[in-house]
Image (cartoon, rainbow, N blue to C red):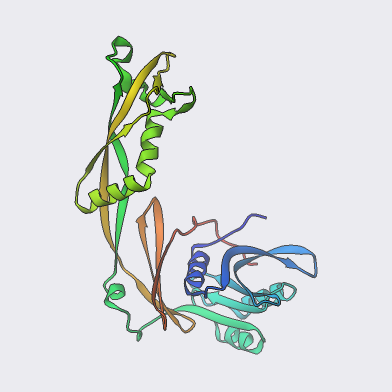
């Protein structure tokens, strides 16, 4: 059975990961075995801790929507976990719980209910109240390529730019090492190049120029099958820095103050999370899962 998720479930999983202690693991959409029917059941979030004698499972089930969770939903989740290895069941509702749902949960041993309630009184630092500044370094775009040949070449390479992606660099031992573009992309992902790109972006420089020296004996094979000795690949890449301030929604998850915001970046929507405890302020960045079709009641 494929794992399912919702944006609210994903947010709760990320909050649990942020506030978790170091000796626990947090996994979303974890499968646990039902001992009554010998069948795997999917649990929204599983917090797993090994106390040295046995593994403890704290299971979190989430429900979202504009209405409070009902007593029927509480009973369904309780029944679902009756034959799972669940040591504690945490039920989280995006819109709170009805009075009967609260009373039912309080009457069941090992069941806790939580909501992501708005926090009004907690004194967050200015960093949170004013919004967190996010600096993004957009992937550089190759804007210019120049292949330096060992000797002057003529007509066969007059339209090199049209065949560059199909031309292959061959090392001195005759092994294909990738296209010219592959060489440049590998260079752009090298740690020293990344540092250079970040520095250029912070300084407002939009163009990065670099060169890749090659070992003696390297050759370029063009699509026609001809070989040419090459000594260096020069390139130019344009990079950009994008600055955004993320508004953080303040909330309380149980007794823990949390703040969360969403922004568009790094190839899609991103969650920015913060929590505060006696150890100080914690901030985490995560990519929410794509929003699936509406999730049926379990």
Q: Quadrant of residue 57?
A: bottom right
Query: Which residue appears farthest toward the left when viewing the image?
Result: 204
Q: Nearer the viewer, residue 143 or 189?
A: 189
- The reply, left or right, for residue 45 in relation to residue 251 is right
Q: Nearer the viewer, residue 171 or 18?
A: 171
| Quarter of the C terminus within the rendering | bottom right
In this picture, residue 241 sits left or right of residue 252: left
Q: Is residue 4 above or below residue 139?
A: below
Whole-percent x and y of residue 48? 62, 71
Image coordinates for residue 117, horizontal then vertical, percent: 44, 79
Q: Residue at x 41, y 13 (%)?
A: 226
Count of numbered circles on the image = 0
The residue located at (35%, 56%) in the rendering is 264
Say which quarter of the image contains residue 179.
top left
| Quadrant containing the N terminus in the rendered view | bottom right
Give the percent coordinates (x, y) of residue 71: 62, 80
Residue 147 versus residue 122: which sits nearer the camera?
147
Position above or below: 110 against 290: below
- Please tell me whether residue 270 is drawn above or below residue 218 in the rendered image: below
Q: Position of residue 164 (x, y in %)?
A: 36, 24
Q: Residue at x 71, y 73 (%)?
A: 85
Q: Residue at x 42, y 17 (%)?
A: 223
Query: Among all residues in the image, which is located at the extreme front?
Result: 216
Q: Is residue 6 left or right of residue 181?
A: right
């Amino acid at each position: 059975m494929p794992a399912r998720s919702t944006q609210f479930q994903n947010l709760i999983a990320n909050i649990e990961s942020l506030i978790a202690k170091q000796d626990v693991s947090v996994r979303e959409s974890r499968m646990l075995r039902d001992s009554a029917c010998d069948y795997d059941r999917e649990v929204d979030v599983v917090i797993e801790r090994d106390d040295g004698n046995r593994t403890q499972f704290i299971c979190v089930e989430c429900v979202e929507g504009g209405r409070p969770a009902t007593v029927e939903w509480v009973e369904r989740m309780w029944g679902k976990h009756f034959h799972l290895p669940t040591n504690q069941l945490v039920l989280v509702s995006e819109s709170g719980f009805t009075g009967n749902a609260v009373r039912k949960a309080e009457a069941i041993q090992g069941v806790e209910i939580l909501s992501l309630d708005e926090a009004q009184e907690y004194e967050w630092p200015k960093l949170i109240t004013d919004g967190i500044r996010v600096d993004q370094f957009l992937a550089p775009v190759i804007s210019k390529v120049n292949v330096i040949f060992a000797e002057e070449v003529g007509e066969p390479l007059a339209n090199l730019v049209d065949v560059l992606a199909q031309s292959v660099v061959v090392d001195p031992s005759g092994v294909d090492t990738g296209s010219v573009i592959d060489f440049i992309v590998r260079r752009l992902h090298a740690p020293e190049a990344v540092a250079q790109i970040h520095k250029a972006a912070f300084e407002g420089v939009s163009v990065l120029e670099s060169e890749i020296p090659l070992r003696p004996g390297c050759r370029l094979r063009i699509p026609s099958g001809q070989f040419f000795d090459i000594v260096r690949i020069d390139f130019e890449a344009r990079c950009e820095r994008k600055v955004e301030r993320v508004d953080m929604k303040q909330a309380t998850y149980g007794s823990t103050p949390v703040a969360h915001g969403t922004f568009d970046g790094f190839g899609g929507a991103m969650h920015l999370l913060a929590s505060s405890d006696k150890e100080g302020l914690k901030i985490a960045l995560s990519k929410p899962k794509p929003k699936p079709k509406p999730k049926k009641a379990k």
